[in-house]
Amino acid sequence: MLLQLSAEFDLQSDVVPWLLAQGPAAALETFEKSAATPYIVNVERNGKIIYTWKGSGRNTCIGLYDPLNKQNEHLYTFEKDLHIISCSINNEKTLLAVSFLQSTKEERVNQLLQPVSKCLTLLIEIHPVNNVRVLKAVDTCIRVQFLYPVANRNPFPESHLLLISEDKYIEQFHIHVVTEDHHKVVIQNSGQLPRDRVADDLIWAQWDMTEQRLFYIIPKESRNILKCVQFYPDENFNLILEAPLDISLRDIGLKFVNLGYDYSQDQEMEPRSLNLQVFTSETGSFCLCCSQAPDMPKEVTYSVSFLHKGYSKTFTVALQRTDYPQVKEVAFLNLDYYVAIYLPGHFLHLLNTQHPDLMCYNLFLTGEDARINMLHKSSIQSPFKSAVWDCCSGRMFTVRINECSLMQFLWNSKLDSDRLAALHCALLHVRNTTDLEMQIIQWISENLSACYTFDPLQEFIIASLYWAMCPETSKLDKLLPYTSLLYWNGIIPGITCMTDIISLPELKVQNCKGFWEKLNLNLECVKYAEPHLHYNNNVLRREWYKLLSEEKAEERRTTTYLRNIFENAKKVLSNLAAWNLEERLVPLFQEEDYQQRLLIGLMVTQLKDHLMRHLQYVGKMKIDQIVLDYVSKLLDLICRIMEAVWRKYSLQSCVLCLDERGSAAEFAAFHIMSRILEAANGMCMPLPPGFHTLHMGLGVRCLPLHTLLHYIDNGVLQLTETFAIKLLKDLDNTEKNEKLKFSIFTRLPEAIGHKVSQLWNHPVNSNFIARNSVKLLLDKLRKRQHNRPVMDRLSVHVEFLPLNYLVDMLAEVEEQDLNPFEEEDDIVNAKFVEETALKHTMMLLGL
């Protein structure tokens, strides 16, 4: 059960006991024997719940439940049996708007000679109960809804009431109130209340109680138009958005969403009615969800239009169970970053609203994983974010993703699409607890080879950085990468998807704030090709390789350019050290790794340039800090992965000694470090200082020599100066160790080899140094096209013509100041080469 419900309100436990405790015993008996149970008619923005019940003598009563203090309050009683279809109370609890049917169908048949309006809409003063004013007396149903201030504020002398009519129009009434006798609140207007026409000819409407917005659809000849009106507490209202729709809405009747609940209308609702809902989120996501009762009992189709992205996705699901009772429609739930599509007994589909482009980010669950406890019927509304209203049972819930169930689903998943979707969903919730991050790392360490279509380490690092950094600055989510995948060719069993391009909404008001500002930013990114805005490591990789090749060819860039890069790297490493004051368990050497420091500094430089181009309204110091934190957190994430691995396998924090063999736990750690290196190379991400040295140390302890050398030759293991020095110190000169040392030394990078070779006083090393010296001198000589000199510059002349020939040539090169070893106290020269060659010859001859 991935989605977990927490009961916030239940008529049977929060209201019925209070009702039974009211009034005389006769009323109690009447209530208990009544077939008409209490039911919810509306939920206000402040969370207060309006309900109705039949009291003594079949009176119709209205009550209010406050979830904060968990108290009930009686608001008003009609001394006759009425069918209330809509009710709303203003923020100050001084006015009550009620819309009800005046009689039942049977009574209307008997009253044909007495024409009476079917629906009556009243405005009642309830502080205290006083005057009643008729707002509407018509033959069509009316819905009522008071506007609420967006923020808590002192009571204001004017209330605003929306009337939504089945005659397809919406009006706003302005109600001025005054205080009499120090406590009585009455309506000031003696005549008709001033009103505004909000909309006409609508066929669908949805109220957003949290943000005080009204969405409605108007049919046009070519296509239907979705409009949105934003209401303000002290001002009027603005038409703020229009969006053309490609959805067919013929013969759907008129339907209201989040404008109360009429249980009789729900029971009479046609089984093929269209279910249409709008969901928004603080990130600027704007989704239109649509479903219709299926033509075929074995499949269901629904669509989600991502209006903030410019495309829609239509899903068709093959129903596996035919024994489950037929439901009227799927339920749509707003989970902020996700939209949930729920068909009780069949499936639960979670759609990522911020990144809906790849199907693999959507969780599609069936069976026990899809079941939601306490939610089995289809009369479900989602009045605001993470809330569920079960209209039939009269219960309100908060809904959230159960992290334990999510991790269990991740562990049990067999498909890469499920693993990837669950991984991203879990990383979204890591901000709530560090324990969840450790559980994810645990799963990654045991499933590195189980995922075939994506690298879990890459996804973990990229997505973790994304969710950690994006809340800091607006638009940052458009500029930082959120995945390592560019496309997805996988198929999710049981569901098919079709994507269509749709028209973008048009904002009618400029310089908007809040949600509208973020929506406008999303739309601008779509217009200017959003994928190209995300930071890409390909440019970083090319520049890094170019700098390394220039370093190898001794063609360095300007000193200032490189100095800035290494200064950036120094800041990152200092920032990382400041975050981790406690001693780490992993024995990482704090070494001078030229390549990694170059990559760290270069990443800072390029990411900073990327953000500066697109975040022009953000100051340079702010961008500098964002980039510094991003690269520091990247290195810290890798360190935390390794820390978790060290704890999992109970490895020692002491520096590894190279003269001992490694354990099975060390081999497992070595394997994970190899996968970390592979992931980092794939994304061109830097590694923390000391990573390569520790990796090499584990390799020497865990691998046989031929495998070790194979790993080095193929770049899986990278040699460092620190490791080479440690190799000399830890290993003696036994035949086996000499073979290892010489194999390593012949593979050392040239710059490291020059420094370390002088520390090993051994004939094999001397022979290696001599050979290397000859090679370098001859290469330089060939490049400069010098003629061969014939000179004798040695104190003792040896009668061995090949050697004489070589030594004379080397001596001439030295004379021309071409010796690359001249800074090493003239230890390596032509004479040294001659003596080493003779010693090596004597050794081979056994002399």
Image: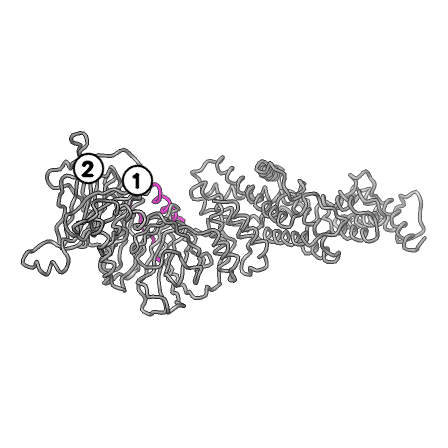
As measured in the structure, the alpha-carbon distance from the residue carrying label 1 to the one carrying label 2 is 23 Å
Q: Nearer the viewer, residue 359 or 406?
A: 406
Q: Nearer the viewer, residue 67 or 778?
A: 67
In the rendered image, residue 42 lying in the magenta stretch gets the answer: no
**Residues drawn in magenta:** 502-525
Residue 107 image point, x, y percent: 12, 58
Examine the rendering and report whether any part of residue 545 can be seen.
Answer: no
* Residue at the image point whose x is 89% and y is 43% from the top: 793
User: Left or right: 156 with respect to 303?
Assistant: left
Residue 387 image point, x, y percent: 35, 49
Q: Nearer the viewer, residue 722 or 818?
A: 722
User: Left or right: 686 with respect to 112?
Assistant: right
Give the residue type that dot 1 points to. Answer: Val
User: Left or right: 39 with respect to 349?
Assistant: left
Examine the rendering and report whether any part of residue 32 can be seen.
Answer: yes
- Helix, strand or loop for disc 2: loop
Question: In the image, which is nearer the foreground, mark 1 or mark 2?
Answer: 2
Q: In what quadrant of the picture does the N terminus appear?
A: bottom left
Residue 713 image point, x, y percent: 70, 55
Q: Which mark is residue 150?
A: 1
Disc 2 packing (10 Å; few <14; some 14–19; many ≥20): some
Give the residue type that dot 2 points to. Answer: His
Quadrant assignment, res 76: top left
Q: Nearer the viewer, residue 811 or 417?
A: 417
- Helix, strand or loop for disc 1: loop
* Residue at the image point whose x is 12% and y is 50% from the top: 137
In the rendered image, residue 507 lying in the magenta stretch gets the answer: yes
Location of mark 2 (residue)? 127
